[in-house]
Image (tube, coloured by chain):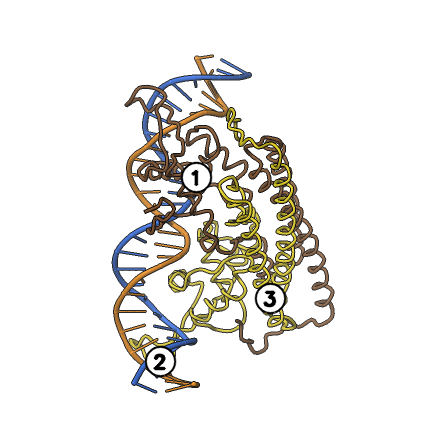
Chain colours: A brown, B yellow, C blue, D orange
Amino acid sequence: MTSSQNSKKQELPPTAWAVLGLLSFPGERTGYELKKWADSSLRFFYWSPAISQIYAELRRLEELGYAASARSGPEETRAKRRYAITDAGREALAGWAADTAEAGPPVLKHGLLLRIWLGHLAEPERLRAMVGEHLERTRGELAAVREAVEHADGVPQWSFPTLALRWSERQHLAELELAEALLTDLDGLAQNRQSPGRQADGDAPTPG
Amino acid sequence: MTSSQNSKKQELPPTAWAVLGLLSFPGERTGYELKKWADSSLRFFYWSPAISQIYAELRRLEELGYAASARSGPEETRAKRRYAITDAGREALAGWAADTAEAGPPVLKHGLLLRIWLGHLAEPERLRAMVGEHLERTRGELAAVREAVEHADGVPQWSFPTLALRWSERQHLAELELAEALLTDLDGLAQNRQSPGRQADGDAPTPG
DNA sequence: TTGCCCATGTAATTTGTTACATGATTTA
DNA sequence: TAAATCATGTAACAAATTACATGGGCAA
């Protein structure tokens, strides 16, 4: 059997692949370093697992032979442990990344929008304030993305991560525009509510 | 003690609030109906819990006195069970929704971008194809959002859900533009890779 | 009469978080 | 020498999914 035809696909959660992905760039690193790296770049378009989960995934990856670790100090001293990806790991990761069915649609969990959706429970002023706070926060995030881009840009090994970060930069710009448009829509709603005066508790229409 | 001052905040997962939110619109509905509704609208800006979890959350909400249910048939016959929000539930939900600290930044889990980030493991052609598939899928999603908007638009009780869906429509349009820009960037990368010829395995720079 | 949609629920399992314990190294 | 950061790990728990079991009603 050829190596590209492992009929039994490794079933691993996306987090495991993301951690292995972090290891797929040149160099060896500790779980701690991986966490910091995830916080400053992965999190913008995917997400940053808890440090305890990173350690757990690293152990699993090592068991599977996808990663190898070396202690810096002597055994038993709980010293720094640096991980590197193995050839088998690189191959498995490439196989997973090429599987487009695996990817599925992007998942968005937008707390602000959930609250807008529940706008009938809040004061209009409160809603506008929430969108304003969201704008502020998003500007901060955008600055963080730009820092990450600056850090990564120009390094040949990081051309693809840079691409992802550039996408993220544009994504944050879009998020700002979306929020502005939302404010406008909110104003429009307030206008229409001016005259009617009735909160309309008629028959419930069918959702769905 | 006034009802608006329960000093002990109810700690509930976002899913519980989302389910209660579904109940906050006029009418009584079954868990099954809630699931369908979540699939066709909530999922675009938040996410749609598994049906088994919806049932679990409904039980919890009822225990807390935030929702009440009535069987359609006689007891013990596992008949249809319709849920409605209670006054206490509405109040708790309003309190949660107004808490802006609770909201946190939006979370995005973008499988395609994770794969772009790992672009060094794939054929350039494969990457382009993946973005193409993403464009296709996003167009389909956009159509689904528009259907939902059409369904909700004009119904007075649903003005805020309609707002959220409009936001989602624009968000999907932005997603399409982002993907087009990504294709362009991918082309740019391919151009630069033309001459060098070396896969550069020099010193590992420090990520972070 | 077969299959699909409606409808509810349980059980097992996985995934992921927070809180905690521990100690080395660096910096003020 | 005190505090911050680096670094690894365990334990308890919460959140969420998948698979499964059950059965009524309706349409081809």
Q: Which mark is residue A19?
A: 1
Q: Give the image quarter of residue A59.
A: top left
Does B144 appear above or below B129? below
Name the amino acid, label 1.
Val
Tell me if residue B15 can be seen.
yes
Residue B196: x and y, percent? 60, 32
Query: What residue is pinned by disc 2?
Result: B73
Asked if badge 2 and badge 1 are on a common chain, one would say: no
Q: Chain of mark 2?
A: B
Q: Badge 3: few (under 14), some or many (20 or more) residues near its Cα, within 10 Å?
A: some
Quarter of the rendering containing residue D17: bottom left
Which SS class for mark 1? helix
Give the x, y percent position of residue B114.
51, 45
Q: Nearer the viewer, mark 3 or mark 2?
A: 3
Amino acid carrying label 2: it is Gly
Mark 3 to mark 1: distance in Å? 34 Å
Query: How far is disc 3 from disc 2 in space, using C-alphas?
Result: 39 Å
Residue at coordinates 43% horizontally, 28% vertically from top-left?
A28
Residue at the location (50% across, 34% down)?
A: A37
Residue B104: numbered disc = none
On residue B143, which mark appears? 3
Using the rendered view, name the quadrant where residue D16 is placed: bottom left
Q: Secondary structure at mark 2?
A: loop
What percent of the width, then of the height, locates residue D28?
43, 85
Mark 3 belongs to chain: B
Q: CA distance from mark 2 to mark 1?
A: 51 Å
